Amino acid sequence: MSKSYVRALKCRECGQEYPIEPTHVCEFCFGPLEVAYDYDRLKGKFTRELIESRPQTMWRYKELLPIDGEPTVGVQNGYTPLVRARNLEKYLGVSELYIKNDSVCYPTLSFKDRVVSVALSKAVEFGFTTVACASTGNLAGSVAANAAAAGLESYVFIPHDLEQGKVLGAGIFGTKIIGIRGKYDDVNRLCSEVAGKYGWAFVNVNVRPFYAEGSKSLGYEVMEQLGWKAPKHIVVPMASGSLCTKVDKSIKEFIKLGLIEDNGTAVYGAQATGCSPISKSVKEGTDLIHPVIADTIAKSLAIGNPADGYYANRVIHESGGWAEDISDQEVVDAMKLLAEKEGIFAETAGGVTLGCAQKMIESGRLPRDESIVLCITGNGLKTQEAVLNAYAKPRIIDASLKEFDLLAQADGVK
Amino acid sequence: MKQRVYLSFSEKTVREPLIWKLGHEFDVVTNIRTAEVREHMGLVGLEIEGKTEVVEAAVKWLEDQGVHVDPIEQNIIEG
């Protein structure tokens, strides 16, 4: 008998169920498929004690991740720090602020390691030997690294003019990188055709339902690290909108299984104004997402037509949250603020999350006297170009104590 | 070949019978699988079946009419 608690793949639109296979779209209505679990079978078996007895990785919640048995890829991934941000609390005038710091996620310093571990573990179960993705950054590096460690072949598709640093971040792991010339939409469509034609596990196409479930582990960890309770408010960056929906799902699952009390958690979404189709829809009070052409320095969030936008909008609306967006300059300012106040160097998406939270605190959308968690999803070393002109350059002196004394004096050092 | 796409119609194009026109301009079978039409925009999940080059030309024609055409996975390229 299967050790898995996964019951089926279920269409989010029409509810039609499908067997557990590498497939992602409802054949009937084109709705996205989502993993459905047998929660009744888990009740009473999946306890706090059982979870706490396991190693501190994302797999301590494996019953709620869609694998059959033990993970084979990314066994050590996850369980990143939840930091009490006391300096930012003072600065922002809030009483209880935490940072879920996935900028130190193992092994490639972004939360994509969570989703990729699940996608690749599932791909191995399905018998795939080659995995693939299309990416402009974090996902490429994560697929390449995790595939290398698991002994899988990998293909990574990128726009042909991607910056050298980002190509290196995937290439170093020995993946096969294909640069594609053309407009964004043409490149995107080609990737869909490749995914349909070749017998590979394309992480965010044919194994997407499994891939996306990996995001829930971030939510589970936050709740356990808060002492088995959900925050009152949680702010997540939005690209496709998937993380927003999966954090919400993680909270609902823990409530359903009796692991936490219902705290009425509100979920908030953050985007950069240069690519803010979900935020715009929330603010305008509509549930239809207008595709946009992305133009922002927050490239890891630059998805102009987000697949889960409609569902993220619904989660925000139903949970009583809100969405906000900020300019590129505000993104840089918030990256600096996070670094200077908490010693955390986040990528541009982290600036988006903090900057939007700051804006929502100021506007009263986020209350100052209740617990708030900010989800930081990637490391600043990956987007250094964004802050090249935003830090104090070194003051150069000769190797002379006299010269340093003058500087120290100017700084008021006694 | 059979291609599955999402068509996003803007305020300008949402009232135009473009899928009907597509069927007259190109030798393709169109099959609407899902649709949501509002005053300011429309979204249609469409299956287009025909010879590869004809389907590709049909997609190009839709784009030329101002329709945004995405694969049903929408954005595959992630950050």
Image (cartoon, rainbow, N blue to C red):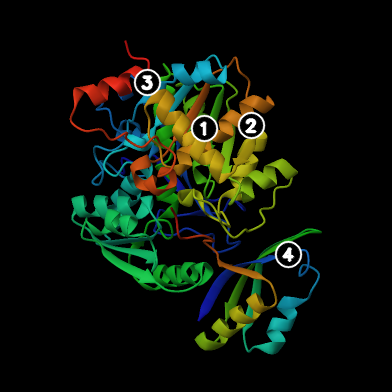
Q: Quadrant of the N terminus of chain A?
A: top left
Distance between the alpha carbons at the discs numbered 2 and 1? 16 Å
Amino acid type shown at disc 1: Leu
Q: Is residue A374 left or right of residue A125?
A: right
Q: Quadrant of the C terminus of chain A?
A: top left
Distance between the alpha carbons at the discs numbered 3 and 2? 47 Å
| Dot placed on the residue nearer the N-terminal end, 3 or 2 | 2
Residue A354 is tagged as: 1
Chain bearing tag 1 is A
Distance between the alpha carbons at the discs numbered 3 and 1? 33 Å
Q: Is residue A239 visible?
A: yes
Q: Is residue A91 left or right of residue A396?
A: right
Quadrant in which residue A66 is drawn: top left
Residue linked to disc 4: B10
Residue closest to the eye, A414 or A68: A414
Which circle, 4 or 1, is nearer the viewer?
1
Chain bearing tag 3 is A
